[in-house]
Image: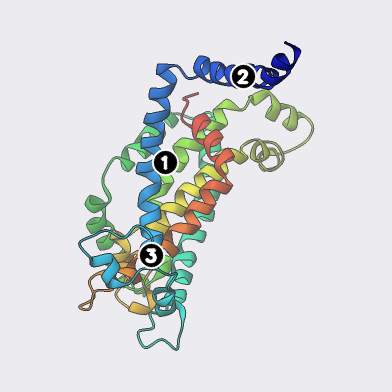
Amino acid sequence: MSELKTAVSPSYTHSPQKQSILERLGRWLTWKKFIFLMVMLTFLSMIIFPFYWMISSSFKTRAEIGGRTPVYVPSALRLDAYQELFDPSHPSFQDFGRTIINSATIAIPTALIAVVLSTLGAYAIARLHFKGKNVMLNSILLIYLFPGVLLIIPLFAMLARLGTIFGFDVQDNLAILIFTYLAQTLPVALYMLTNYFRTIPSEIEQAGLIDGCDRLGVIWRITLPLAVPALISVAIYTFMIAWNEFLYAFVFLNDSNMFTMPIAINTLYNDPSPRPNVVMAASTVMTLPVMILFLGMERFLAEGLSAGGVKG
C-alpha cells in the first residue's frame, strides 16, 4: 500500500499546481476581457501591419512586390533601394540625403519659431487682461478651420506681391515655406498653450513677481519649466506638419535640389520606370524619425495634449 502511495504521489503533487494555473487563467479571462483582447489585437494589427509592409517592401524585388501572390517576408535583405537613395556610385542615384537636409531645414526652424511665438502669445492671452482677448483666441482658432487648399492661393498672391515690393523670390525659397507652415500651425499651437497656461496656478507667478522677477523672468523661470509637456507637444505637432506637408511644398518648390521628402517621394512614384521598392525605402526613411520622436516623447506628448485640450 505504501508503494502504491509513493507511485502515485508525484501525479498528486503536480496536478493541483496545473489546475490552479488553469483555474486562475479561467477566472481572469472572462468573455469581456477576451473580446477586449481580440479587438485590441485587431486594432494593433491594422496599425502595425502597414508599417511592416512598407519596411519589408523596401527590401523586396520588383517581382516580389508586383506579383499576384503577396510576399510577406522578403527572400533576402537587399539594400538596392537604399543604395539608390544614398550611394553616389549607384547609376540611378537620387541624392536623398540632400532631400532630408531640406526637410530638416524647414521642419526644425518651424517647430522652434512656433514654440517661441505661441508661448509669448498664449501667455499674454492666458495671464494678461485686455478687451477682446477671448474673441481674438476664437478668431485665431477659426482660421485653422479653413482647409489649406483654400488659403494657398491668397497666401501665394500676398507673398508674391511682397516679394515684388521687397525684392525676394517666392519660388524655391525655404524661408517662405517656413512662413507658410507657421501660418498653418500657430493657431492650434496658441490654443493648446493658452489652455495649458490656464491650468498653471497664477499664485505661483504672483509669488515670483513679488520676489522681484519681471514678466519675462517669471515666464523663463516659472512658467516654462511647468509647461514642458505642452511645449514638447507643440514642437512635435509643428515639426510633424512641416516634415510631412506636401501641398504647399509642391506649389512653392520647383527646383529638384530644393525638394522636400514628400515631393521627392512623389517624383519617384511618378517616374516613368516605376521602382516601388525605392518608393517604400524613401517612405521608410521619412517615417522613422517621426516614429522615434513620438515614442521618445510619448509621456510628454500625452500629458501636454490632455492638459491643453481642457478649457480653463
Residue 260: x percent and y percent? 38, 68
Which numbered disc, 2 or 1, marks the residue that appears first in the sequence? Answer: 2
Identity, as a three-letter code, of the amino acid under mark 3: Pro
Residue assigned mark 2: 15
Q: In the rendered view, tell whether residue 296 sits above or below residue 15.
A: below
- Packing grade of label 2 (10 A; few <14, some 14-19, many >=20) is few
Residue at 64%, 25% (x, y): give it: 202
**Does residue 181 appear in this view?**
no
Numbered label attached to residue 295: none
How far apart marks 2 and 1 lie (CA) works out to 61 Å
Q: CA distance from mark 3 to mark 2?
A: 45 Å
Q: Residues within 10 Å of mark 3 (few under 14, many from 20)?
A: some
Q: Is 116 in front, or is 52?
A: 52
Residue found at the far right of this picture:
211
Decide which of tag 1 and tag 3 comes sooner along the chain. Answer: 3
Return the x and y of residue 59 as percentages of the image width and height.
40, 68
The x and y percentages for residue 159 are 31, 63
Q: Nearer the viewer, residue 286 or 242?
A: 286
Q: Mark 1 sits on what residue?
A: 188
